[in-house]
Image (tube, rainbow, N blue to C red):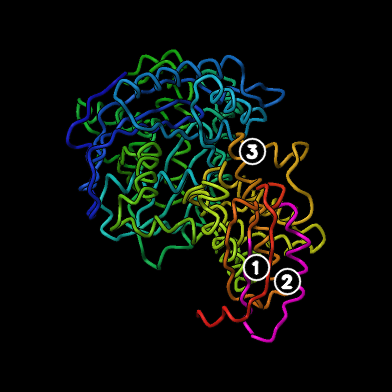
């Protein structure tokens, strides 16, 4: 169903950017539903206004009980909905569709294959995002529609497969967590009686509490003594519960629901009431669809137990969520937001350094390697490759983290680096981007990329494999240029000769009388991969006299 948006759905940020209005679509492929918003972005303000919405309950979370795979039926429903979303976005002349997939696809063994099928059939590339990254984008979405006034706020988002808890204060997200308790997941795993029996209800209640205790404790650890943050709720489950409460209390459901408040006591009464009904009886409750009535008890119980653990008495509806956060993240990455969300735009770099610190990376060394890699990238751009700023940033991240595997063991540390990066919960990056960064680190030494390598085959597209092939070759040269890890080479100048198919590297030593023999030997040893990938011969010379340029 398409909904026209009112001015209440507009959000703006101060900026100096200037451009014409742009139409963008964002799709959230969740465990229970697929949501899409289409927005008009005014880059001058900048602001975005929601001009259309689409939603369908596809239940990707109803997976094969024996294997955990996405079922053919669920995938077919999802493909049909995505095709309809794509057609709607096209009718609004959206310049781009930014799609993300979360818990159900993330966990299913055939999730990546499903995304490849979507790309093959629809030409739609879907970014698979981690739980913490999902939480970060939910925070961006909520923050885009509500003013926090620099006060701490807790956000809870209950989905079909996971629940996100976020603590933020207008700028920095202080705590991000994603826990595998969701309305579809818990209903499928623990509810077999109808109405739910007292035994199953109590087991479900205890299970939820056990799963949420740790993320709640981690969140509370970031609060100052005496701080009592406001709790904001978003998602279909929470909005449905608020609507049920509003009908009972007010006789009508406010539109929009944003800002509506429900107490914990009122929620307790709703939970008790819904749990006493059969699924068919719940479907007769105004505002509860057949599909929602199947999972509402588990979803409501998640919210109730979270409020108890957080020791909060009231919840306020926020409405905006992941899909709006995808829009904000896109605006950040395209330089359209420069004021109160500036801190969020730096999240990628901060996250890389946090992972580096966690695994005790020698940052001085890694930053030198990264600088060499970026210099080689920049000086060969337009001659040997045509990658852009996004690929350049992935190369930087791969260079900073390429040696993190030494934290596990020096032996085969490039393979350990892949694993640590892949599971390091880098924020601000999609799963595809994290996979690229991890593969760049994997191939900074030893073997070149091969199709038989599982990590290489996990890359979602031919283009991603090409990025790894070409940028890992650059990273190998950059690593060779600091072989002794003492900064012996201060500068590298590139000169490309298309006639001779040669790339000249003129190396400037940091100390004039240092012959840098180990760096030059290592460069000669490692340059073969670069030469094969780019079809050039690399010729390196040490030229101390160039040091006068600095």
What residue is at 43 percent from the left and 33 percent from the top?
A: 300
In the rendered structure, does residue 429 fall within the stretch colored magenta? no
Eye-nearest disc, 2 or 1: 2
* Residue numbers of the magenta segment: 504-529
Q: Which of marks 3 and 1 is nearer the N terminus?
A: 1
498 sits to left or right of 164 = right
Q: Residue 41 carries which label?
A: none
Q: Is residue 106 left or right of residue 265?
A: right
| Image disc number at residue 361 | 1
The residue that disc 3 covers is: 459
Disc 3, SS = loop
Q: Is-magenta flag for residue 519?
A: yes
Q: Tell me if residue 89 comes above or below residue 367 in the rendering.
A: above
360 is higher (above) or lower (below) than 217 = below
Q: Name the residue under label 2.
A: 519
Give residue 198's position: percent from left, percent from top. Answer: 55, 28
* Secondary structure type for disc 2: helix
Q: How crowded is mark 2: few (under 14 residues within 10 Å), some or many (20 or more)?
A: many
Residue 420: give x, y in percent of width and height.
67, 54
Would you place residue 339 above or below residue 247 in this image? below
First reached walking from the N terminus: tag 2 or tag 3: 3
């Amino acid at each position: 169903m398409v909904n026209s948006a009112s001015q209440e759905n507009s959000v703006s940020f101060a900026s100096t950017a200037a451009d014409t209005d742009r139409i963008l679509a964002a799709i959230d492929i969740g465990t229970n539903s697929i949501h899409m918003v289409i927005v008009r972005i005014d880059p001058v303000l900048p602001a975005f206004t929601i001009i259309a919405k689409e939603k369908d309950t596809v239940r990707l979370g109803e997976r094969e009980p024996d294997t955990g795979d996405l079922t053919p039926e669920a995938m077919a429903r999802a493909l049909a909905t995505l095709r309809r979303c794509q057609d709607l976005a096209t009718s609004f002349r959206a310049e781009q569709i930014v799609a993300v997939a979360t818990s159900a696809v993330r966990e299913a063994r055939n999730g990546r294959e499903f995304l490849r099928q979507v790309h093959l059939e629809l030409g739609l590339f879907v970014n698979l995002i981690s739980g913490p990254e999902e939480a970060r984008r939910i925070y961006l979405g909520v923050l885009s529609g509500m003013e926090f006034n620099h006060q701490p706020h807790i956000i809870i988002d209950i989905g079909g497969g996971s629940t996100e808890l976020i603590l933020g204060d207008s700028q920095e997200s202080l705590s991000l967590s994603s826990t595998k308790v969701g309305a579809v997941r818990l209903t499928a795993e623990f509810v077999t009686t109808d109405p739910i029996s007292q035994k199953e209800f109590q087991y479900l209640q205890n299970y939820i509490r056990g799963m949420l205790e740790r993320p709640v404790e981690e969140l509370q650890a970031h609060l100052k003594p005496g701080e009592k943050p406001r709790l904001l709720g978003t998602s279909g489950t929470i909005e449905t519960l608020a609507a049920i409460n509003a009908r009972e209390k007010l006789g009508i459901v406010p539109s929009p629901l944003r800002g509506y408040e429900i107490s914990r006591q009122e929620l307790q009464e709703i939970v008790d009431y819904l749990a006493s009904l059969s699924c068919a009886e719940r479907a007769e409750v105004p505002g509860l669809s057949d599909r929602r009535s199947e999972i509402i008890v588990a979803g409501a119980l998640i919210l109730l137990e979270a409020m108890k653990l957080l020791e909060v008495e009231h919840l306020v509806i926020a409405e905006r969520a992941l899909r709006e956060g995808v829009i904000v993240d896109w605006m950040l990455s395209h330089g359209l937001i420069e004021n109160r969300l500036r801190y969020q735009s730096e999240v990628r770099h901060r996250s890389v350094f946090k992972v580096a610190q966690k695994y005790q990376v020698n940052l001085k060394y890694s930053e030198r390697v990264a600088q060499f890699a970026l210099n080689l990238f920049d000086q060969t751009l337009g001659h040997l490759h045509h990658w852009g700023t996004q690929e350049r940033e992935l190369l930087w991240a791969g260079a900073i983290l390429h040696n993190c595997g030494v934290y596990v063991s020096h032996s085969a540390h490039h393979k350990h680096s892949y694993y640590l990066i892949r599971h390091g919960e880098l924020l601000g990056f999609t799963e595809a981007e994290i996979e690229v960064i991890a593969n760049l680190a994997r191939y900074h030494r030893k073997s070149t990329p091969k199709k038989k390598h599982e990590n290489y085959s996990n890359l979602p597209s031919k283009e991603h494999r090409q990025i790894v092939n070409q940028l890992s070759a650059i990273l190998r040269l950059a690593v060779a240029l600091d072989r002794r890890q003492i900064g012996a080479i201060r500068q590298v100048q590139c000169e490309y000769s298309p006639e001779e198919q040669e790339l000249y590297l003129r190396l400037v030593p940091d100390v004039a009388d240092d012959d840098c023999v180990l760096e030059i030997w290592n460069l000669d040893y490692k340059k073969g991969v670069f030469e094969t990938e780019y079809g050039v011969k690399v010729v390196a010379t040490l030229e101390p006299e160039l040091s006068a340029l600095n």
